[in-house]
Image (cartoon, rainbow, N blue to C red):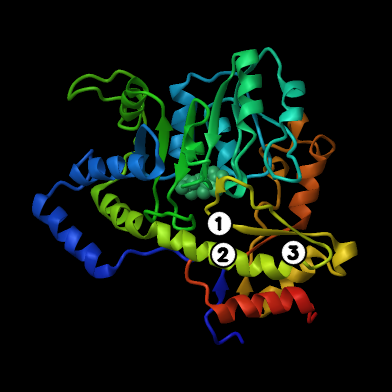
Amino acid sequence: MQDKAPITVTSPLLPQLDDLTCMLKEIWASKWITNNGQFHQQFEKALCEYLKVPYISLFTNGTIPLLTALQALCVRGEVITTPYSFVATTHSIWWNGLKPVFVDIDPETCNIDPDKIEAAITPQTTAILPVHCYGQPCDNQRIQHIADKYGLKVIYDAAHAFGVEINGESILNWGDLSTLSFHATKVFNTIEGGALIMHDEATKKRIDYLKNFGFESETEVVAPGINGKLDEIRSVYGLLNLKQVDHAIQQRQHVAQRYTEVLSKIPGIRILPTIQGVRHNYSYYPIFINPEDYGATRDQLYTALRQRNILSRKYFFPLISTFSTYRGLPSASPSNLPNATLIANQVICLPMHHALTSDEIDNILDIVTNKPF
Ligand SMILES: *Cc1c(COP(=O)(O)O)cnc(C)c1O
């Protein structure tokens, strides 16, 4: 088995090499390779249309937008967030010199539990940083209601939520700002890349300054900015990938349907629900193992898959709150985060990407169903 290429949890959507080469020739001819070039501008416009958002600012990855969002909104003091995410979510709070306050998740959605947010608010709280985990929409209505009541900013880490809509409207329009990641492992990638989504032109202007050292003109620096710019090469790569992302999402949907048909009938395995009216993006396929009912633990299944060269991943284990930087925080104690702790110990993300073959899906389902270990 080990001589075959492994089945990885994800596989990047790549543009046709000939198409890319053709575009690269244009960039070479123009000799304009970064700093808001023509393809960067085209890519922003195309993304606004595809994502149904009014304004977007492209970035070189998905972490700098998180850092910049907190800067742009002048967030101070404490920020309420989820421990059940990729570590960059909390790191962005820390890098701004702010204090992360962890709130437990709702085990049904894996998103921050709105019922538990108010108890975590103190006079120092200025913002909430939720994550649409696996692209499942947060309870925006309740989160925004709390934010309005206490005068808090809301920044959504929407790294998993590319293209997710509810009744035809993008969830990326929620909150004060939303961030995206176009990393190679995501539904839509520019190798490395990311974006911030905002509601108005003034905010876009400010964020465009912030991602370019604060330069307003050749000689005017209006803010302590950073360098977060996306270059022309990755902009054309993104333009080409944008044309095929719908098809890739359809292929992912097909994989998800195959998984769900079988896995929804297996005792001890829980899967995420398909929500009426939501255009899902099938960014991940997490399953949650209850060892008593399933008859094996999450780690037994993980290891068995690995031995057969199927590289599933335990997203998100361990919890961010258990890492050395954060574990001393009062809100990081497992007794404050029982649901996140449980879910982190139950989860496996099965391989999920546009290029999974029927044989590969059958192979994975056979192991999960028949437990040959
Ligand atoms: C991928 C990811 C990020 C970071 O994005 P990069 O592009 O890798 O910097 C942030 N938050 C979440 C939830 C992610 O999954």
- Look at the image and tell me whether residue 234 can be seen: yes
Q: Which residue is mark 3?
A: 264
Please state the horizontal and vertical placement of residue 212, each as a whole percent of the image.
Answer: 30, 32
Q: Residues within 10 Å of mark 1 (few under 14, many from 20)?
A: many
Residue ID for mark 2: 352
Q: Quadrant of the N terminus?
A: bottom right
Q: In the figure, is residue 371 to the left or right of 66?
A: right
Residue at figure coordinates x 53%, y 29% from the top left: 155
Instruction: Assign the C terminus to one quadrant of the image.
Output: bottom right
Q: Is residue 8 above or below residue 150?
A: below
Closer to us: mark 1 or mark 2? 1
Cα distance in 3D space between marks 1 and 3: 16 Å
* Amino acid at dot 3: Ser
- Judging depth in this view, the residue of 35 and 180 nearest the camera is 180
Instruction: Say which amino acid is labelled 1.
Output: Tyr
The three-letter amino acid code for the residue at tag 2 is Met
